[in-house]
Image (cartoon, coloured by chain):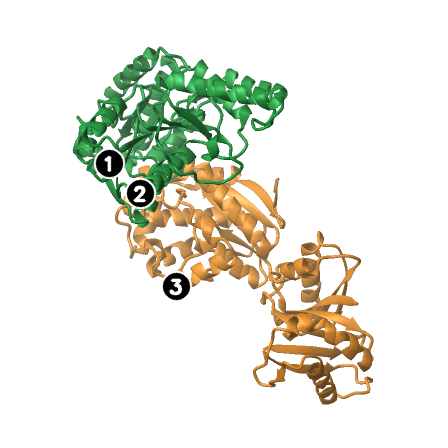
Amino acid sequence: MIYLDNAATTKPCEQAIKAVEDTARNCFGNVSSLHRLGIESEKLMNSAKKTLLKKLGLQGEIYFTSGATESNNLAIRGVADAYKRRGNKIVTTAMEHPSVARTMDCLEKQGFEIVRLSPKDAIDNFEQYIADNVTADTILVSCMAVNNENGFKVDTEKLYRLVKSVNNDTIVHIDGVQGFCKVPLKGDLISLSGHKIHGLKGIGAMYCADKIRFTPLVYGGGQQKNLRPGTEPTELIASFEAAVKAYPTDLTHYKELNEHLRGRLSAMEDVYINSPDNSVYNILSFSVLGVRSEIMLHSLEEKEIYVSSGSACSKGKISSVPDAFGMNAERADSTIRVSFSMETTTEDIDALCDEIENGIARFRRTKKSRRKGNIQ
Amino acid sequence: MKELIMAKYGEIALKGLNKGTFEDILVKNIRRRLRHCGKFQYMRKQSTIYIEPVGECDLDEVMEKLKVIFGIGALQRCAVFEKDFEQIKAQGIPYLENALKNAKTFKVDAKRSDKSFPMKTPEIQVELGGAILEAYPHLSVDVHNPEITVMCEIRDKGAYVSAERIIGAGGMPVGSSGKALLLLSGGIDSPVAGYMMAKRGLIVDGIHFVSPPYTSERALMKVETLCEKLTNYCGDIRFYCVPFTEIQEALRDNCPEEFFTIIMRRLMVKIANIIAERNEYGALVTGESVGQVASQTLKAIQCTDAAAEYPVFRPVIGMDKKEIIDIARKIDTFETSTLPYEDCCTVFTPKHPKTRPVFDEVIKAEQSFDFAPLIEKAVEGTTVKLFRIENKEEQE
């Protein structure tokens, strides 16, 4: 099996699995309990928070959630509600994950003014373009650090600086799911997910800088400062921490893989790279013109090579991301997204490329006349 | 107090000398459907099946299951009393409380098939109606449009009192009209077509064509889910899954693009012919509706029909999409049918399919390649699964 769909989810690492088992066996107390078992669980949770903060290189608080979808909802709806008296405008992008985009739609119905910016309008300096749209009544900027479908990277440190220089009161939320452990992240609120970095599904976190307020989504027994109540899942929290600790810091391997894949693809006729120049190395999106994504995906699947046709979240639903990057319909329709892990080898990439070449020979027999390569 | 359910025949009641056979099948179907609900005694009398629980059972659940069995015209849940009018009044009236307490008008409908009962039908109606009015003074009698019709039947074995009559699924008992093979695509129409033919008493089994890697496993899972849902009405369903990739690729490589769909459908029918012959099916069923898509124009249907060696039933042929969707919602297949997975019909869809294909041209295009060996190979590679009522599937 060659798994090249690590942007959808990753294989849990041994450390994360072991952490679940150890915690479940030896440290199963309720964080809220007054006795020693509770205190041990609390220590475990505090250690995980410190690990996450250290990895982020930021000061503030960590709230554990069920995953990034919840973190994104909590950050955006929480801030919108807490600061609604300060202003009515929210600036976001047209390339966001549905857990951000649908939340914004919901706020729009409630009367907020939502500005959605497309990377295609300022691909070379998107951070500046976002900051230019910030006004005195902008309460929130929400932007993903790394796009999940093509790897497009936003410099969040630069974005933070530029936004604050326009309006120091504007809160910056970063969907850091694809960027965590891979690129530096900076924001007032940052959404994180465990299963994208070889942790388990069902655990995520939201980083919150000091003095940032938000209202909770659910009410309960006061856990996590009453902002995200519910008994803390210490087993999953421990696994999240283990995955963060285990994630390598030297990521040059991704660059090698990326360059190798680009090299192979450049030799194929009518195959185009979709990832913008400014993208992370571990995600590469490309289009094999004349072969619909799904067909290529299933034919690779027959050889136990697993890739994605875009974003795995929606199983066949049409994504808005290609449009945000100005991709034409035919190119969007033939998109393949490859995302690496540190275990991916150049041999894996070669096997993939061989199969893509076979697929091209098999599937690209009709519609030749309609094949066109240009976008933008 | 004893309760039982009377399942009254729909169309079977009109049958002549064959009636017994139909009844046997209906009772068999009912027994199978209720086998997990408890023990029952069945008795047939006067175009009615009396379903009497032996021991504890949830009659609400039983009613739900009976509601979808074809061949039952109406269902009546009733209390059974001795044939003694005083007892009927004393116990029957409290039994009716649930139905009557929130109603405004009612009437009593009596039947006396046991002529030895001392009161005559009008007498029963008047006396029982009076007693009900006394017990529930808020009610008034309306013999033309009553909200509730209280039924009181004096039959051989006892007196039955009921206020709850439900329209049954109607139609003929599944299995009373033979076996047909349903071409299931995964769309909205074909499950509805299967449901409608089952209603006419056919055993409906499904055939589906898969073209990996052009179609995904999820598309197959979707069709299997549809089969599971259909078992609720059709009973057990045998599901034939035909590997179709090679045929579609041969088609793409050898035939003119504008005929892809029409020839593909002809080839599907040819495969269905063989499977029908080997498994003794008497007809094919499709979800075609005139004019809906390019392959369902009159000319196109002529072309596919000519490939069939069996009668092809198209029960939704004259229905609007909306009417079909209404039924799909009723039988709970709509949500599944509209899941967005590629099925084999949409692989290699021509940009401009022929809406009025000339028959001879289609045949000529089809004959430009010898599909027979591929057809035989596809039939050989066909897998069969059995979907049983109550969501159980078995590999054969």
Picture coordinates of residue B316 (x, y %)?
A: 44, 62
In the picture shown, does residue B325 fall above or below A224?
below
Indicate the colour of chain B. orange
In the picture shown, does residue B11 fall above or below B145?
above
Circle 1 residue: A324
- Residue B252's quadrant in the figure? top left
Q: Is residue A15 left or right of residue A165?
A: right
User: Closer to the observer: label 1 or label 3?
Assistant: 1
| Mark 1 Cα shell of 10 Å, populated few (<14), some (14-19), many (≥20) | some
Amino acid carrying label 2: it is: Lys
Which of the image's four quarters has the C terminus of chain A?
Answer: top left
Badge 2 element: loop
Badge 3 element: loop
Amino acid carrying label 3: it is: Asp
Circle 3 residue: B320
Q: Do badges 1 and 3 share one subunit?
A: no
Q: CA distance from mark 3 to mark 2?
A: 49 Å
| Residue B250 showing in the rendered view | no
**Is B258 or B372 nearer to us in this picture?**
B258
- Image marks 3 and 2: residues in contact by CB distance under 8 Å: no
Indicate the colour of chain A. green
N-terminal-most mark, 2 or 1: 2
Amino acid carrying label 1: it is: Ala
Q: CA distance from mark 1 to mark 3?
A: 38 Å
